[in-house]
Image: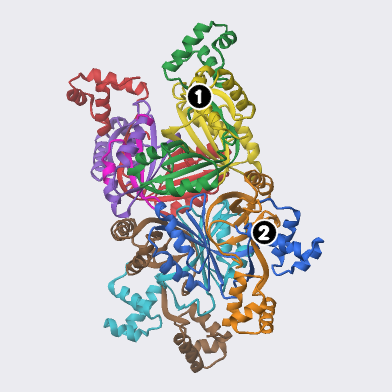
Chain colours: A red, B purple, C cyan, D brown, E yellow, F green, G orange, H blue
Amino acid sequence: MILDEVDRKILQLLSENGRMSYVDIGKELNLSRVSIRERVSQLIENGVIEKFTVVINSDKVGKGVSAFFEVDCEPASLVRVAETLANNPVVASCYQMTGPSTLHMHVLVEDFVRLENFINEELYSLEGITRVESHILLRRFKSRTGLKL
Amino acid sequence: MILDEVDRKILQLLSENGRMSYVDIGKELNLSRVSIRERVSQLIENGVIEKFTVVINSDKVGKGVSAFFEVDCEPASLVRVAETLANNPVVASCYQMTGPSTLHMHVLVEDFVRLENFINEELYSLEGITRVESHILLRRFKSRTGLKL
Amino acid sequence: MILDEVDRKILQLLSENGRMSYVDIGKELNLSRVSIRERVSQLIENGVIEKFTVVINSDKVGKGVSAFFEVDCEPASLVRVAETLANNPVVASCYQMTGPSTLHMHVLVEDFVRLENFINEELYSLEGITRVESHILLRRFKSRTGLKL
Amino acid sequence: MILDEVDRKILQLLSENGRMSYVDIGKELNLSRVSIRERVSQLIENGVIEKFTVVINSDKVGKGVSAFFEVDCEPASLVRVAETLANNPVVASCYQMTGPSTLHMHVLVEDFVRLENFINEELYSLEGITRVESHILLRRFKSRTGLKL
Amino acid sequence: MILDEVDRKILQLLSENGRMSYVDIGKELNLSRVSIRERVSQLIENGVIEKFTVVINSDKVGKGVSAFFEVDCEPASLVRVAETLANNPVVASCYQMTGPSTLHMHVLVEDFVRLENFINEELYSLEGITRVESHILLRRFKSRTGLKL
Amino acid sequence: MILDEVDRKILQLLSENGRMSYVDIGKELNLSRVSIRERVSQLIENGVIEKFTVVINSDKVGKGVSAFFEVDCEPASLVRVAETLANNPVVASCYQMTGPSTLHMHVLVEDFVRLENFINEELYSLEGITRVESHILLRRFKSRTGLKL
Amino acid sequence: MILDEVDRKILQLLSENGRMSYVDIGKELNLSRVSIRERVSQLIENGVIEKFTVVINSDKVGKGVSAFFEVDCEPASLVRVAETLANNPVVASCYQMTGPSTLHMHVLVEDFVRLENFINEELYSLEGITRVESHILLRRFKSRTGLKL
Amino acid sequence: MILDEVDRKILQLLSENGRMSYVDIGKELNLSRVSIRERVSQLIENGVIEKFTVVINSDKVGKGVSAFFEVDCEPASLVRVAETLANNPVVASCYQMTGPSTLHMHVLVEDFVRLENFINEELYSLEGITRVESHILLRRFKSRTGLKL
């Protein structure tokens, strides 16, 4: 699927305000409400738009600690471990990367007590994990949301 | 600000579908459209909801390569480097973490030619950078969006 | 529990001289011996003051070698290993940290013969330990005592 | 100076309770108050006892974040950097160790905002620092106080 | 076997153009076609020339991703693992080096989907592999072919 | 350019024997000498075949030591350093990779005396190089030539 | 045992020439042959002089490759592995150090074929070894012999 | 120079006892004193025997601390730094190796006070040194002397 300029503008507007009405989008782009709705439907159908969502401030909902993990696994256990971790609600994302470490994982928890509890009870107890490295977020310079990294 | 059970349910519904109408949310929670709208306004005003947005599939919009960087800086240059990188449109996020590396950065680009160009032209040319490590995303097991990591 | 200015001054005086009489503390703060005693009792009861103790010079009591260890464990064995090590009298402290290594431990021993003996006989023999890194203290620039790190 | 069995018992009692009266110590060891006082004076004079102090719970006095740093310096700047850091009140200890990193430092601060501020404003601004690694304490298995590590 | 100046010139000419006729080589070196043919036969017989081949541009034949791997093995499994990997057609080369990592391997595949598939299905499933590190080629500054590295 | 089955077979035959006559290739594939010559010309013109060459055994021509280098550069100097190294005749290949190190280089030299001389005289003297790591080839399990890695 | 100035001078002379006659040593130090012999006997008896030996140039006796190894062991196997390696004639020295690696070993062999054979046949086959890192000596700036390191 | 069996036996005997008389060596090998003397002269002249020396126990002469250093230098300063260090009497050996670190150095000193003094005053003050890693010898499993490593 190839996106034209109008598609890209619609994505940009929705990215900034996901609840913007099709009428308002149409006004910006000199198009009718109907043609905007059609294009958005097309973008959803083709998988360009995966979902409409909200950006929630994690501090404000009591998820004060943002931690990044490098999880080394026995190679043969990697996929199983990754799928188990992906099911844990505190895990925000979980990737396999090139480079030295087998899984890269973001975790959001209330506080350090919960973090230590997650590490010792839910992470270290998984079979096939050989080494874990964790780091805590200190400062956020940029955090683009809405794009699937 | 303390969130009650209703606030949390609203956030969860909007997280799954950011364009859900207040009428439909109200039906789910046995509340009126007006009271939902008031609560959402409150959540926005208090900074809990930062914005409504769309999750866009980066592959589908031609951002096929997702790379993670660890950027070591001369300590005195860190904040300046971070702010410069945060302004670069290919940079999706940029954090300062505890641990060995001074900046953790996510980059989304079209292809490897653009990646090499970004590295050699836009990253390595910044004064104060001493060492760069990059890794490429191989597989995505979980990628929660809408939460500010 | 919230400490006021007087509490903080009492803690500072006791930190400098743990045997200072309540009369002398009272003189410094323009308070009666009785009110000082009451506040100290309160600080102990609330767990602010954990104990009164002495700072002993480890060199002078024949503990000439101060070593720091990073102890990597099989994740599932970490808590058991940590508790075993914490019971060893040469272990001065034992922490779990974020970052690459699972246990951070301080050891105080008489000399290198005892250190090698501790490593080979008491540390390497523990099941679940996968890798050990040790470093020796060369010079002490600051060493604040009395605060629980 | 060589310590005899009585000296060691006195040190152990004072280590457990730094305000124990000489009368009570004497009762435990079947010695007079005067001879205990003389021995304690001797231990102070010889530098075995460095000071009497209190163990304060850092969480209870609002020092909730305990961080360990490895600070790499340009070799020629190490001593100057170490002495500057040792004067900073948030620095609890600062050592030079064998091994890969030039300075090992413990820091106690109120929260992550203060930590990030310390790192970016007070640490990274020091000339001669080339690389910093930080880790956060997750769990304390043992923390012996009163001994100079 | 000792090569003289004429042998070296023949090797250089064939290295630049492996299909150069013996007549043309002879003209360059002021020698007859027959003596060139004899020398080339000698070079083949003595194992100096291992084979005549073509340099194929891997991008143009759809091998767009060039990856380097460091494969750590249980020491006792190294030779078996290396021989298994050497039989995999995507593996272009596989060496044992001095230094920290036991096997150094070059892999050429169509794209990232195939790379991830190779890693998870064909590499991580091998018994005796303990850790894998992969890196992707970004830019080629020099790539001499025809010499056995 | 899209290769068909015949093109692939021609490449495979030339890869095994770069001097195979077009008549013999034609016999294998049931095609005329002329059509083979045309296809080969096309493959050359399109850049699929970069050149015809010989695989020379480096041991037999007195290049007994095969070394791999990781060369860290000041980011701003990387391209200049890479181009200088690429011009050095002992350098067989020089790549920029993802991962921790900026340049990956293969070197072929006569012996260790020449290697040390290359390192100290030709490599370490380049401005902009900050750290060099070298490893020596111990054993070759697979070494495919003719493909541009 | 305390060495006086004369003992130190004798050690220095023997260190430079281990076959120097006691008469010649005596002349240098204005002492009789007998008193020199007595002192040397005393130095041997007290273990100061461990043995008289020759410094042999390893290159000249066909030990052209000097390699250093860092051998990581399962902690519980360290002493057994070290003792096995110490019995191998190609092992020149084998130490346990502080720091990250469990055994530090020097090996002297004829050539790279023998080195690869030692690594794959004699080292990797030992049970309890988890990781091996090897480096080759490039240049000797100083090599004091006769002192037990 | 090619050594025969008799040369090797002479070297072995002198390696075990560097002061063994030529008469005694002759008896062992069924050769005359004169022919032994001639062969030894030949071994010295050809550089096989570099010198006769004594193995001195470093602990017994008050060199209680044996430390190994990895010294990273600015590449362009390596040779100068190495030559300066080689002239320092506490440096027992100093090598350039393949692998990650530019200089490998052994140091023998009286105690930790002297070690810290060497590091801070004599090592860190050298221009061109960028990073130093030190480790202390814990246990000696094998220490062959008389061979130039």
What number is the disc on residue D53?
A: none
Using the numbered discs, state the Cα–Cα distance from disc 1 to disc 2 in whole angstroms.
Answer: 48 Å
Residue named by callout 2: H43
Callout 2 crowding tier (Cα within 10 Å): few <14, some 14–19, many ≥20: many
Examine the rendering and report whether any part of residue B15 can be seen: yes
What number is the disc on residue E29?
A: 1
Q: Residue at x 53, y 7 (%)?
A: F33
Q: Residue E89: horizontal and vertical position, in percent?
A: 57, 26
Q: Is residue B27 left or right of residue H119?
A: left
* Viewer-proximal residue among G70 and G98: G70
Callout 1 crowding tier (Cα within 10 Å): few <14, some 14–19, many ≥20: few
Kind of residue at disc 2: Leu
**Front label number (1 vs 2):** 1
**How many numbered discs?**
2
Q: Residue H126: horizontal and vertical position, in percent?
A: 40, 63
| Residue extent of the magenta highlight | B83-112
Q: Quadrant of the N terminus of chain A?
A: top left
Q: Residue D91: horizontal and vertical position, in percent?
A: 36, 66
Q: Are marks 1 and 2 on the same chain?
A: no
Output the chain of dot 2: H
Examine the rendering and report whether any part of residue G3 can be seen: no
* Viewer-proximal residue among D130 and A110: D130
The image quarter containing residue G97 is bottom right
Residue A130 part of the magenta-drawn span: no
Residue B103 part of the magenta-drawn span: yes
The image quarter containing residue C23 is bottom left
The secondary structure type at the circle numbered 2 is helix
Kind of residue at disc 1: Leu
* Viewer-proximal residue among D126 and B28: D126
* Viewer-proximal residue among B29 and E130: E130
Q: Residue A100: horizontal and vertical position, in percent?
A: 49, 43
Evaluate if marks 1 and 2 touch, with contact meaning CB atoms under 8 Å apart. Answer: no
